[in-house]
Image (cartoon, rainbow, N blue to C red):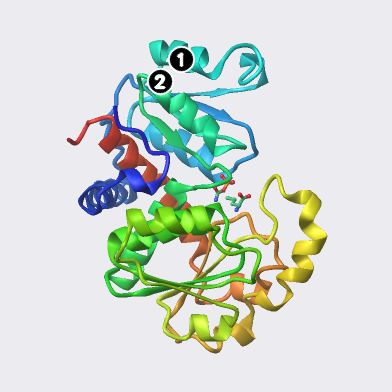
Amino acid sequence: MRHLLTLEELSPAEIERVFSISEDLKSKCEQGLREPLLPGRVMALIFEKPSLRTRVSFETGMAHLGGSSLFLGNDVGFGRRESLADFARVLSEYVDVLVVRANRHTTVEELAKYSTRPVINGLTDRAHPCQAMADLFTIRELAGTLRGRTLAWIGDGNNVACSLAIGCGKVGMKMVMATPKGYRFDAPFMTRLNEIVPDLELTVTDDPKAAVRDAVAVYTDVWTSMGQEAEAEKRRRDFAGYQVNAQLMAHAQQETLFMHCLPAHRGEEVTDEVMDGPQSVAVQQAGNRMHVQKGILAWLLGAQA
Ligand code: CP
Ligand code: NVA
Protein backbone atom coordinates (compact mmCIF):
# COMPACT_ATOMS: atom_id res chain seq x y z
CA MET A 1 0.00 0.00 0.00
CA ARG A 2 1.51 3.33 -1.08
CA HIS A 3 0.66 6.53 0.78
CA LEU A 4 1.79 10.11 0.22
CA LEU A 5 2.47 11.57 3.67
CA THR A 6 5.75 13.33 2.84
CA LEU A 7 7.86 13.47 -0.29
CA GLU A 8 10.19 11.06 1.44
CA GLU A 9 8.00 8.26 0.05
CA LEU A 10 8.60 9.13 -3.61
CA SER A 11 11.77 8.24 -5.49
CA PRO A 12 13.16 10.77 -8.01
CA ALA A 13 11.92 8.50 -10.83
CA GLU A 14 8.43 8.39 -9.32
CA ILE A 15 8.36 12.18 -9.00
CA GLU A 16 9.28 12.44 -12.67
CA ARG A 17 6.60 9.87 -13.52
CA VAL A 18 3.94 11.89 -11.68
CA PHE A 19 5.14 15.06 -13.48
CA SER A 20 4.90 13.39 -16.84
CA ILE A 21 1.35 12.09 -16.19
CA SER A 22 0.39 15.56 -14.89
CA GLU A 23 1.88 17.27 -17.94
CA ASP A 24 -0.07 14.99 -20.26
CA LEU A 25 -3.32 15.50 -18.32
CA LYS A 26 -2.76 19.28 -18.20
CA SER A 27 -2.25 19.54 -21.91
CA LYS A 28 -5.37 17.43 -22.58
CA CYS A 29 -7.33 19.53 -20.07
CA GLU A 30 -6.30 22.70 -21.88
CA GLN A 31 -7.71 21.19 -25.08
CA GLY A 32 -10.98 20.53 -23.29
CA LEU A 33 -10.33 16.80 -22.81
CA ARG A 34 -11.08 15.20 -19.45
CA GLU A 35 -9.57 11.75 -19.64
CA PRO A 36 -11.63 9.46 -17.35
CA LEU A 37 -8.78 7.42 -15.93
CA LEU A 38 -10.52 6.69 -12.62
CA PRO A 39 -14.17 5.93 -13.39
CA GLY A 40 -16.21 4.93 -10.36
CA ARG A 41 -13.38 5.67 -7.93
CA VAL A 42 -14.29 7.58 -4.80
CA MET A 43 -12.08 9.94 -2.81
CA ALA A 44 -12.91 10.99 0.78
CA LEU A 45 -11.60 14.31 2.10
CA ILE A 46 -11.23 14.96 5.83
CA PHE A 47 -10.08 18.46 6.70
CA GLU A 48 -9.36 19.69 10.24
CA LYS A 49 -8.32 23.13 8.90
CA PRO A 50 -9.76 25.44 6.23
CA SER A 51 -8.77 25.08 2.58
CA LEU A 52 -9.61 26.55 -0.79
CA ARG A 53 -6.91 25.25 -3.13
CA THR A 54 -6.30 21.77 -1.76
CA ARG A 55 -9.94 20.86 -1.37
CA VAL A 56 -11.24 22.31 -4.63
CA SER A 57 -8.31 21.19 -6.75
CA PHE A 58 -8.59 17.61 -5.47
CA GLU A 59 -12.37 17.49 -5.90
CA THR A 60 -12.28 19.05 -9.36
CA GLY A 61 -9.36 16.86 -10.40
CA MET A 62 -11.18 13.71 -9.31
CA ALA A 63 -14.29 14.81 -11.24
CA HIS A 64 -12.14 15.32 -14.37
CA LEU A 65 -10.82 11.80 -13.94
CA GLY A 66 -14.34 10.36 -13.90
CA GLY A 67 -14.40 9.64 -10.18
CA SER A 68 -16.23 11.35 -7.37
CA SER A 69 -15.45 12.79 -3.98
CA LEU A 70 -16.98 13.04 -0.53
CA PHE A 71 -16.02 15.97 1.66
CA LEU A 72 -16.62 14.68 5.19
CA GLY A 73 -17.84 17.32 7.59
CA ASN A 74 -18.22 17.53 11.34
CA ASP A 75 -21.01 14.95 11.42
CA VAL A 76 -18.59 12.04 10.89
CA GLY A 77 -17.04 12.93 14.25
CA PHE A 78 -13.46 12.56 13.04
CA GLY A 79 -11.18 12.11 16.05
CA ARG A 80 -14.13 12.21 18.46
CA ARG A 81 -16.58 9.36 17.89
CA GLU A 82 -14.13 6.48 17.51
CA SER A 83 -10.46 5.72 17.28
CA LEU A 84 -8.50 6.83 14.21
CA ALA A 85 -7.74 3.17 13.59
CA ASP A 86 -11.44 2.20 13.42
CA PHE A 87 -12.20 5.30 11.34
CA ALA A 88 -9.51 4.38 8.81
CA ARG A 89 -10.43 0.70 8.66
CA VAL A 90 -14.11 1.44 8.04
CA LEU A 91 -13.58 4.29 5.57
CA SER A 92 -11.27 1.97 3.59
CA GLU A 93 -14.25 -0.33 3.05
CA TYR A 94 -16.09 2.44 1.19
CA VAL A 95 -13.64 4.65 -0.65
CA ASP A 96 -10.54 4.23 -2.82
CA VAL A 97 -8.38 7.04 -1.45
CA LEU A 98 -8.34 9.41 1.53
CA VAL A 99 -7.09 13.01 1.44
CA VAL A 100 -6.48 14.35 4.93
CA ARG A 101 -5.59 17.82 6.26
CA ALA A 102 -4.70 17.43 9.90
CA ASN A 103 -3.53 19.60 12.76
CA ARG A 104 -0.91 17.04 13.73
CA HIS A 105 1.23 14.99 11.37
CA THR A 106 0.82 11.99 13.66
CA THR A 107 -2.87 11.92 12.67
CA VAL A 108 -2.09 11.15 9.02
CA GLU A 109 0.55 8.63 10.11
CA GLU A 110 -2.00 6.87 12.33
CA LEU A 111 -4.62 6.81 9.56
CA ALA A 112 -2.09 5.45 7.07
CA LYS A 113 -1.14 2.71 9.51
CA TYR A 114 -4.68 1.31 9.53
CA SER A 115 -6.08 2.36 6.15
CA THR A 116 -6.10 -0.26 3.42
CA ARG A 117 -6.43 2.55 0.86
CA PRO A 118 -3.83 5.20 -0.02
CA VAL A 119 -3.75 8.19 2.34
CA ILE A 120 -2.66 11.51 0.85
CA ASN A 121 -1.48 14.30 3.14
CA GLY A 122 -3.34 17.50 2.27
CA LEU A 123 -1.21 19.48 4.79
CA THR A 124 -0.12 18.92 8.35
CA ASP A 125 2.02 20.94 10.74
CA ARG A 126 5.07 19.19 9.31
CA ALA A 127 4.48 18.67 5.60
CA HIS A 128 2.58 19.75 2.50
CA PRO A 129 3.82 17.30 -0.12
CA CYS A 130 1.16 17.95 -2.80
CA GLN A 131 2.00 21.66 -2.62
CA ALA A 132 5.72 21.00 -3.12
CA MET A 133 4.99 18.67 -6.04
CA ALA A 134 2.94 21.37 -7.79
CA ASP A 135 5.63 23.95 -7.03
CA LEU A 136 8.44 21.90 -8.55
CA PHE A 137 6.19 21.10 -11.53
CA THR A 138 5.61 24.85 -11.99
CA ILE A 139 9.33 25.64 -11.94
CA ARG A 140 9.99 22.78 -14.38
CA GLU A 141 7.25 24.10 -16.66
CA LEU A 142 8.47 27.70 -16.63
CA ALA A 143 12.22 27.36 -16.24
CA GLY A 144 12.80 24.12 -18.13
CA THR A 145 15.09 22.17 -15.86
CA LEU A 146 15.25 21.62 -12.13
CA ARG A 147 18.61 19.94 -11.57
CA GLY A 148 21.28 22.39 -10.42
CA ARG A 149 18.84 25.32 -10.02
CA THR A 150 18.41 27.16 -6.72
CA LEU A 151 15.18 27.78 -4.83
CA ALA A 152 15.32 30.74 -2.42
CA TRP A 153 13.00 30.38 0.54
CA ILE A 154 12.37 33.62 2.43
CA GLY A 155 10.65 33.31 5.81
CA ASP A 156 9.42 30.64 8.17
CA GLY A 157 10.92 27.14 8.09
CA ASN A 158 7.39 25.70 8.09
CA ASN A 159 5.50 22.73 6.62
CA VAL A 160 5.79 24.01 3.03
CA ALA A 161 9.51 24.71 3.45
CA CYS A 162 10.09 21.21 4.86
CA SER A 163 8.37 19.58 1.88
CA LEU A 164 10.20 21.79 -0.61
CA ALA A 165 13.55 20.91 0.99
CA ILE A 166 12.87 17.20 0.53
CA GLY A 167 11.56 17.85 -2.98
CA CYS A 168 14.61 19.94 -3.94
CA GLY A 169 16.89 17.18 -2.71
CA LYS A 170 14.98 14.56 -4.72
CA VAL A 171 15.12 16.52 -8.00
CA GLY A 172 18.69 17.81 -7.59
CA MET A 173 17.87 21.42 -6.79
CA LYS A 174 19.70 23.55 -4.24
CA MET A 175 17.83 25.45 -1.55
CA VAL A 176 18.83 28.68 0.16
CA MET A 177 16.76 29.68 3.16
CA ALA A 178 16.74 33.18 4.57
CA THR A 179 15.12 32.46 7.89
CA PRO A 180 15.59 34.09 11.28
CA LYS A 181 17.02 32.07 14.14
CA GLY A 182 14.29 30.28 16.04
CA TYR A 183 12.31 29.59 12.85
CA ARG A 184 14.79 27.36 11.03
CA PHE A 185 14.46 23.60 10.56
CA ASP A 186 14.82 21.89 13.93
CA ALA A 187 17.55 19.37 14.67
CA PRO A 188 15.36 16.23 14.27
CA PHE A 189 14.17 17.41 10.84
CA MET A 190 17.74 18.30 9.77
CA THR A 191 18.87 14.81 10.76
CA ARG A 192 15.99 13.24 8.83
CA LEU A 193 16.67 15.49 5.83
CA ASN A 194 20.30 14.38 5.75
CA GLU A 195 19.16 10.77 5.75
CA ILE A 196 16.50 11.19 3.05
CA VAL A 197 18.36 13.53 0.69
CA PRO A 198 22.05 13.44 1.69
CA ASP A 199 23.05 15.29 -1.50
CA LEU A 200 20.79 18.29 -0.90
CA GLU A 201 22.80 21.53 -0.87
CA LEU A 202 21.00 23.57 1.77
CA THR A 203 22.29 26.99 2.81
CA VAL A 204 20.71 28.86 5.70
CA THR A 205 21.28 32.58 6.11
CA ASP A 206 19.73 35.61 7.74
CA ASP A 207 20.38 37.71 4.63
CA PRO A 208 17.41 37.63 2.20
CA LYS A 209 19.31 39.68 -0.39
CA ALA A 210 22.11 37.13 -0.61
CA ALA A 211 19.55 34.31 -0.74
CA VAL A 212 17.70 35.57 -3.83
CA ARG A 213 20.78 36.43 -5.95
CA ASP A 214 21.11 33.22 -7.99
CA ALA A 215 17.63 31.84 -7.52
CA VAL A 216 15.41 30.46 -10.26
CA ALA A 217 12.50 31.17 -7.90
CA VAL A 218 11.96 33.22 -4.77
CA TYR A 219 9.36 31.58 -2.56
CA THR A 220 7.64 32.83 0.54
CA ASP A 221 4.73 31.76 2.74
CA VAL A 222 2.82 33.35 5.60
CA TRP A 223 4.73 34.20 8.76
CA THR A 224 1.88 32.79 10.84
CA SER A 225 0.58 29.42 9.68
CA MET A 226 -2.84 28.01 10.54
CA GLY A 227 -2.87 27.11 14.23
CA GLN A 228 -0.16 29.64 15.19
CA GLU A 229 -2.47 32.65 15.41
CA ALA A 230 -1.58 33.32 19.07
CA GLU A 231 2.02 34.01 18.00
CA ALA A 232 1.07 36.39 15.17
CA GLU A 233 2.30 39.57 16.80
CA LYS A 234 5.67 38.17 17.82
CA ARG A 235 6.10 36.61 14.39
CA ARG A 236 5.35 39.96 12.69
CA ARG A 237 8.22 41.47 14.70
CA ASP A 238 10.61 38.56 14.16
CA PHE A 239 10.05 38.41 10.39
CA ALA A 240 10.01 42.17 9.82
CA GLY A 241 13.19 42.14 7.71
CA TYR A 242 12.02 39.19 5.61
CA GLN A 243 9.31 40.72 3.47
CA VAL A 244 9.49 39.93 -0.24
CA ASN A 245 9.12 43.37 -1.80
CA ALA A 246 10.40 45.15 -4.91
CA GLN A 247 13.63 46.14 -3.13
CA LEU A 248 14.39 42.51 -2.38
CA MET A 249 13.38 41.27 -5.84
CA ALA A 250 15.79 43.84 -7.32
CA HIS A 251 18.59 41.65 -5.96
CA ALA A 252 17.32 38.65 -7.97
CA GLN A 253 17.52 38.16 -11.73
CA GLN A 254 14.88 39.67 -14.01
CA GLU A 255 13.63 36.20 -14.98
CA THR A 256 13.49 34.92 -11.39
CA LEU A 257 10.02 33.66 -10.55
CA PHE A 258 8.11 34.77 -7.47
CA MET A 259 6.17 31.97 -5.81
CA HIS A 260 3.71 31.72 -2.95
CA CYS A 261 1.60 28.72 -1.98
CA LEU A 262 -1.29 31.03 -0.96
CA PRO A 263 -3.28 32.15 0.92
CA ALA A 264 -1.09 35.26 1.30
CA HIS A 265 -1.08 37.84 4.04
CA ARG A 266 -0.42 40.73 1.69
CA GLY A 267 1.54 43.53 3.36
CA GLU A 268 3.28 41.03 5.65
CA GLU A 269 5.44 38.43 3.89
CA VAL A 270 4.81 39.92 0.43
CA THR A 271 3.75 43.25 -1.02
CA ASP A 272 0.95 43.70 -3.56
CA GLU A 273 3.57 44.99 -6.00
CA VAL A 274 5.43 41.66 -6.02
CA MET A 275 2.39 39.41 -5.73
CA ASP A 276 0.69 41.14 -8.66
CA GLY A 277 3.91 41.88 -10.55
CA PRO A 278 5.30 40.31 -13.73
CA GLN A 279 7.52 37.80 -11.92
CA SER A 280 4.71 36.33 -9.85
CA VAL A 281 3.47 32.87 -10.84
CA ALA A 282 1.37 32.32 -7.72
CA VAL A 283 -1.90 31.86 -9.61
CA GLN A 284 -0.41 29.45 -12.16
CA GLN A 285 1.15 27.61 -9.20
CA ALA A 286 -2.29 27.29 -7.59
CA GLY A 287 -3.74 26.11 -10.90
CA ASN A 288 -1.08 23.45 -11.15
CA ARG A 289 -2.22 22.01 -7.82
CA MET A 290 -5.12 20.47 -9.74
CA HIS A 291 -3.07 19.12 -12.64
CA VAL A 292 -0.42 17.60 -10.38
CA GLN A 293 -2.98 16.13 -8.00
CA LYS A 294 -4.63 14.46 -10.98
CA GLY A 295 -1.20 13.00 -11.74
CA ILE A 296 -0.79 11.88 -8.14
CA LEU A 297 -4.25 10.26 -8.06
CA ALA A 298 -3.76 8.53 -11.41
CA TRP A 299 -0.32 7.28 -10.34
CA LEU A 300 -1.31 6.21 -6.81
CA LEU A 301 -4.48 4.48 -7.93
CA GLY A 302 -2.63 2.70 -10.67
CA ALA A 303 -4.54 3.97 -13.67
CA GLN A 304 -1.28 4.69 -15.47
CA ALA A 305 1.00 2.18 -13.81
N1 CP B 1 -1.89 26.29 -0.68
C1 CP B 1 -2.90 25.65 -0.07
O1 CP B 1 -2.78 24.50 0.37
O2 CP B 1 -4.06 26.37 0.00
P1 CP B 1 -5.35 25.95 0.84
O3 CP B 1 -4.99 26.09 2.29
O4 CP B 1 -6.39 26.94 0.41
O5 CP B 1 -5.71 24.54 0.49
N1 NVA C 1 2.14 27.30 6.04
C1 NVA C 1 0.76 27.52 5.73
C2 NVA C 1 0.43 26.91 4.42
C3 NVA C 1 -0.99 27.08 3.96
C4 NVA C 1 -1.26 26.43 2.64
C5 NVA C 1 -0.12 26.94 6.84
O1 NVA C 1 0.19 25.84 7.31
O2 NVA C 1 -1.07 27.59 7.24
Q: Nearer the viewer, residue 241 or 52?
A: 241
Residue shown at 35%/40% (left/top)?
A: 294
Asked if 169 appears above or below 48 in the picture, the reply is below
Asked if 89 appears above or below 242 in the picture, the reply is above
Asked if 172 appears above or below 243 in the picture, the reply is above
Residue extending farthest to the left is 305
**In-image side of 274 versus 213 (left or right):** right
Numbered mark located on residue 10 in the image:
none
Tell whether label 1 touches label 2 (CB within 8 Å).
yes
Q: Tell me the crowding category of disc 1: few under 14, some 14 to 19, or many 20 or more residues within 10 angstroms, Cα based.
A: some
Numbered mark located on residue 115 in the image:
2
Residue 55 appears in the picture as rendered: yes
Quarter of the rendering containing residue 150:
bottom left
Nearest-to-viewer mark from 2 and 1: 2
Residue shown at 43%/46% (left/top)?
A: 130
**In-image side of 122 versus 184 (left or right):** left
Quarter of the rendering containing residue 39:
top left
User: Residue 154 in the image: x percent, y percent?
Assistant: 57, 71
Q: Nearer the viewer, residue 266 or 37?
A: 266
